[in-house]
Image (tube, rainbow, N blue to C red):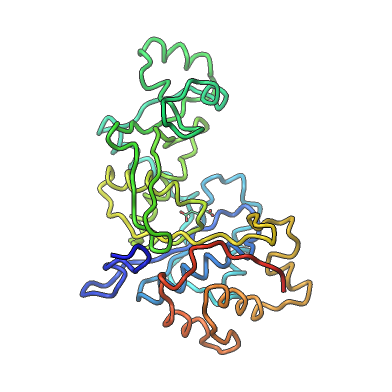
Amino acid sequence: MVANEPASHEVLGAHKPGAGRYAPSPSGDLHLGNLRTALVAFLAARGTCRDFLLRIDDIDRARDKGFAERQLADLRRLGIVWELPVMKQSERDHAYYVALQTLCEQDRVYECVCSRKDILTAPTAPHAPPGAYPGICRTLSTAALQRAKAKIAPRLPALRLKVAASERQLCFTDLIKGRVCAPIDDFVLRRGDGVYAYNLATVVDDAAAGVDQVVRGDDLASSTPRQILLARLLNAPAPSYAHVPLVVNARGVRLAKRDGAVTLAQLREQGVGTAEVLQMLLLSLGMAADPLATDALKAAACDFAFHKLSRDPFVFKGF
Ligand code: GLU
């Protein structure tokens, strides 16, 4: 198979497909890069007869300063709609707890007292990527662990996944990028402050919601092997993955707030309407649908195919 062709399960077969989703973190207003990814997720789901779900990744509750509602409003303005209630990670601790227990029962979890500094200054295993956890706490004796835990109190130990030597690298076929391989270290499942980690939460939520098509930003592609491994251990079906190339500024740097008007609200202030933004985003995806038509996104969904998308970042040069 050519790497950028749709995988066979992307093509409608005898079974009704599950769902696609968009899962923003409510850490700010959505910028053009986020909106473009959301659009791809929506068109991909609609174009393959999937349900489209919206999830708010607010597991780190402190970060939501009312942004979630603004994000949902911006998505609706673009014509991105969903039927089912929005899933919120802040309401799903019990499901994460149950998944963690499943991993504990498989003897796959260990406590870790290491600080960021401990990890950065520890000798790394040969060929390990920078920042990979070298497994310091995995081999501590019970007595040494107890002493270390007493030292860090009242902070609690984090919980990490025991990754076997044979699982330390995993490859998958991305629907846009083709073959992607990334290393897997003993990554965190629950942080020392009790917050469940992104990788665990995402796998549990996608499985619970029947998501079988994950579309998200390219920056998360290297996390995907971890999630595929977790899904296997939790006996959850692995979804297909599509990582959308980022939007960058004229200097090739990932689009950010400092690049000026990059959110719908900012653009509106500059006289750029939502229809114009939608047209620009559709064009950036190689689609020439008329955004003023009431069914612009329906037409775009009909025309949508992952293999038509560019693998390169999209350079935003302004309106
Ligand atoms: N919440 C993540 C973000 O906004 C995306 C998570 C995902 O799609 O798996 O970057």
In this picture, residue 211 sits left or right of residue 86: left
At 44% from the left and 62% from the top, the residue drawn is 215
Which sits in the foreground, 129 or 70?
Answer: 129
Q: Position of residue 263 (x, y in %)?
A: 68, 65
Q: Quadrant of the C terminus?
A: bottom right
At 57% from the left and 46% from the top, the residue drawn is 61
Asked which quadrant contains residue 161, the reply is top left
Which sits in the foreground, 137 or 79?
Answer: 137
Q: Is residue 151 above or below residue 317?
A: above
At 38% from the left and 10% from the top, the residue drawn is 143
Q: Position of residue 270 (x, y in %)?
A: 79, 73
Q: Position of residue 32 (x, y in %)?
A: 63, 65
In this picture, residue 256 sits left or right of residue 282: right
At 51% from the left and 32% from the top, the residue drawn is 131
In this picture, residue 190 sits left or right of residue 152: left
Q: Position of residue 101 (x, y in %)?
A: 31, 36
Q: Is residue 147 above or below residue 241?
A: above
Q: Quadrant of the N terminus?
A: bottom left
Q: Is residue 31 above or below residue 97?
A: below
Which sits in the foreground, 137 or 256?
Answer: 256
